[in-house]
Image (cartoon, coloured by chain):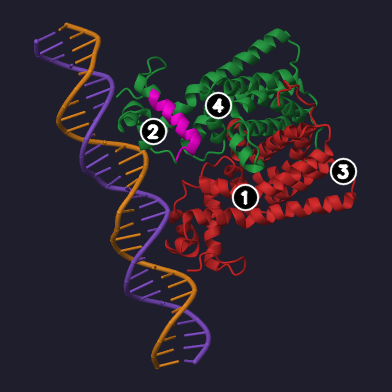
Chain colours: A red, B green, C purple, D orange
DNA sequence: CACGTAATCAAACGAACGTTTGAACCCCGG
DNA sequence: CCGGGGTTCAAACGTTCGTTTGATTACGTG
């Protein structure tokens, strides 16, 4: 009963469970995926999840964190590197956008597993499950704060509050773009090759996001 | 056992059930909301849902359709009216955006119930439940096709495929913007008054969407 | 006032859920 | 060869799920 083992030494069983869980979570959602589905798909005993992770909630968090932690670490590192290269000068907006969304989009393009995880992550943002929301707030909080300030320096004419909103919109467009390919198909009736779509998606989305980010400021009553 | 009654004459019990269900679905998701939660909140007997709607899935669809059908009808009518006024001239992009997203945003601003429904609708797009996906495809299909063509006429320089993608992005930004105010709070730590936020959201989002829609075209390898 | 239909009710249905148990198993150090 | 910790296993735990039942109440109609 280790149940909370540190970073190293994840057993083969744990890997198989997380892979199966990620795939099933992405396809059916968290609550609709039962322990029996997970363990059957993983080819392990039903009790294995509780033995190795402690509970279903803990498994959900483990699956999310497995790729989200390195992804956000990469985001921090990419921004560090960009700021180092700029040598004190304010970053260009498109560079910051690339730092934040580039990594995740590349991840979604690279492999079926990556695509699966990004689809899962997209679903995650509208997921009411407390365990999920706690995990998101904890993992994204520092990163978002860092990027918000970076954007604010890059676009000094845009009020900080507006930056936050546009970040929010960019999040939405991205998570939906990644997780909703099937929705796109359902709505438009167009057949899309998913791998091809994901590859083309990066430049398409980047262009869209930058256009939105740099749009003229709306005129809102100056109340706050 | 009417169970499939036509548009008129929804009983008080049915209304109370749909109101309670909508609120709970928006707060906890479809699967996490049990029949017992719904009927207790509505103050009706447990068997009432199955009696009046037939099943939980049918209730889900009834709750979605209740506001979605008139909303999409309004979208069609708004586009009709705009095209009538243009008298044959191609519509401006911002007019089409206003037609599509204006109604829903106004709905979200108008009442707590409207806000609730839009939040629910946002969740709906990433919902794997078959009943939900069937409902979305059916209700949105014609509307999306109509608007896609309108955008294509308004922006003749933009390939149809690119239009579809940008529509997709705009959907994502919007549904996320509406449904994820709490996510915004969780990620940024900023406290937001929801009613105020929803009111300001319309011009903010419109500006962002238009900026994205009119962004320079990405350069993608000409492979299809 | 009776009659019949629609609606509501308490109670129970079988199934599936997440979790726990205790025995069996594997493998390595003594 | 034996002993013990880490792991896997079948089985069952108690709970909750969506749904169904059959009796009971409310009510417009002849």
- Residue A138 numbered mark, or none: 1
Label 4 vs 2, first from the N-terminus = 2
Mark 1 against mark 4, which lies toward the viewer?
A: 1
Residue A178 appearing in the image: no
Label 3 vs 1, first from the N-terminus = 3
- Vertical position of residue A138 compared to residue A148: above or below: below
- Cα distance between the residues tagged 4 and 2: 19 Å
Disc 4 marks which residue?
A: B115
Of residue A6 and residue B159, the one placed in the foreground of this image is: A6
Q: Residue at x 59, y 47 (%)?
A: A120
Q: Are marks 1 and 2 in contact (CB under 8 Å)?
A: no
Q: Which range of residues does the magenta coloring cover?
A: B16-31
Q: Are marks 3 and 1 in contact (CB under 8 Å)?
A: no
Q: Residue at x 58, y 24 (%)?
A: B108
Residue B44, picture quadrant: top left
**Magenta stretch encompasses residue B26:** yes
Q: Are marks 4 and 2 in contact (CB under 8 Å)?
A: no
Q: Secondary structure at mark 1?
A: helix
Disc 2 marks which residue?
A: B38
Q: Chain of mark 4?
A: B
């Amino acid at each position: 009963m280790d149940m909370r083992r540190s970073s190293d030494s994840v057993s083969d069983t744990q890997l198989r469970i997380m892979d199966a869980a990620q795939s099933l979570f992405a396809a059916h959602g968290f609550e609709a995926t039962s322990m029996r589905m997970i363990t059957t798909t993983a080819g392990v005993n039903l009790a294995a999840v509780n033995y190795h992770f402690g509970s279903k909630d803990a498994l959900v968090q483990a699956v999310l964190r497995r790729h989200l932690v390195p992804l956000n670490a990469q985001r921090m590192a990419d921004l560090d590197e960009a700021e180092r290269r700029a040598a004190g000068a304010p970053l260009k907006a498109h560079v910051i956008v690339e730092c934040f969304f580039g990594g995740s989009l590349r991840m979604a393009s690279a492999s079926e597993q990556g695509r699966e995880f990004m689809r899962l992550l997209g679903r995650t943002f509208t997921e009411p499950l407390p365990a999920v929301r706690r995990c998101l707030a904890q993992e994204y909080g520092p990163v978002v704060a860092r990027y918000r300030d970076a954007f604010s320096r890059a676009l000094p004419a845009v009020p900080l509050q507006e930056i936050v909103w546009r970040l929010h919109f960019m999040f939405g467009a991205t998570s939906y773009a990644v997780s909703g390919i099937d929705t796109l198909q359902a709505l438009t009736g167009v057949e899309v090759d998913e791998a091809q779509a994901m590859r083309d998606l990066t430049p398409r989305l980047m262009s869209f996001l930058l256009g939105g980010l740099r749009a003229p400021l709306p005129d809102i009553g100056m109340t706050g």
